[in-house]
Image: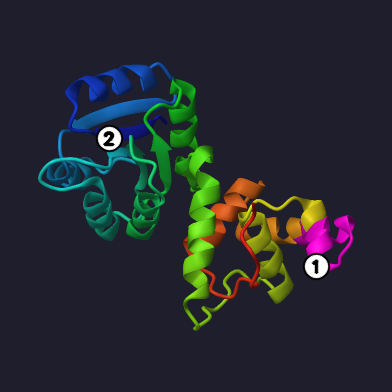
Amino acid sequence: MKIQVLIADDQTLFREALEQAISLEKDIEVIGGAADGEEAVRKALASRPEVILMDLKMPRMDGISATRRIKESLPGCRIVMMTLFGDEEYVHQAILAGADGYLLKDVRRLQVVEAIRQVHRNRCLIDPSLMRGVVDQYVRMSRGESAARPRPDGLTEREVEILSLVARGRSNKEIADSLFLTVGTVKTHLYNVYQKIGVSDRTQAALYYIHKGFKDAPAESPPR
């Protein structure tokens, strides 16, 4: 079965070029396009695509509002924001709206294709050039809130602590040094974390940390 994709972008030329680019893949099928957020919502509800490539800035309704509307009715639909804007606040708003990915429009064709496949597998994806800034911003925001949210997926306090450091880009050795553990112990904890939250790498773990909104990150200076 092919992954059914809807493309929402107000620039017709970009939308058509993107359709041609990803339609080269045997496992992906573009089933429609939309020129604004309202049309994206309407077509999504009618055709129920598995993945939507969503522009951020569009007339009548922006991509973040459209994402929120679509997710309310189709929570299983995966949405990847594609935009020229790399501002951390936009990324944060997109995540809160329910976006499963965030890519800048200057990415290569194969990166878009891989993003479609990743979110279709229920994984999250943020452009690597934006990842560090997003995590740092989230950590700053989380320190301003006193209430701790329940930890999902059976994570222990130590596992959450290590997960927060992974999200901030720390290596295993840096984590071990800061927590007075051995590198082997850190690797064991990470293996357990990956198993519990259903991810396979550090980037996915960091995105999980952001999505779940942990509020009990250890007080620590952001990475230089």
Q: Amino acid at mark 1?
A: Leu
Front in this rendered view, residue 13 or 195 = 13
Chain-order first, disc 2 or disc 1: 2
* Residue at 40% in and 16% down: 24
Q: Position of residue 31 (x, y in %)?
A: 26, 30
Label 2 SS = strand
Q: What is the spatial separation of the Cα atoms under label 2 and label 1, in whole angstroms?
A: 46 Å
Packing grade of label 1 (10 A; few <14, some 14-19, many >=20) is few
Q: Residue furthest front?
A: 224
Q: Amino acid at mark 2?
A: Leu
Vertical relation: 105 (above or below) 168? above
Q: Position of residue 136 (x, y in %)?
A: 54, 57
* Residue at 64% in and 52% down: 224
Q: Position of residue 218 (x, y in %)?
A: 65, 72
What secondary structure is the magenta-colored segment mainly?
helix
Q: Tell me the residue that label 2 is attached to.
A: 6
Q: In screen coordinates, is 201 left or right of 70?
A: right
Front in this rendered view, residue 184 or 193 = 184
Q: Position of residue 39 (x, y in %)?
A: 13, 41
Packing grade of label 2 (10 A; few <14, some 14-19, many >=20) is many
Q: Residue furthest bottom?
A: 147
Q: Tell me the residue that label 1 is attached to.
A: 179
* Residue at 33% in and 34% down: 84
**In the image, which residues are magenta?**
175-189
Q: Can I make out residue 94 in this image? A: yes
Q: Looking at the rendered structure, which numbered label has been put on residue 85?
A: none
Vertical relation: 34 (above or below) 139? above
Vertical relation: 17 (above or below) 135? above
Label 1 SS = helix
Q: Quadrant of residue 79?
A: top left
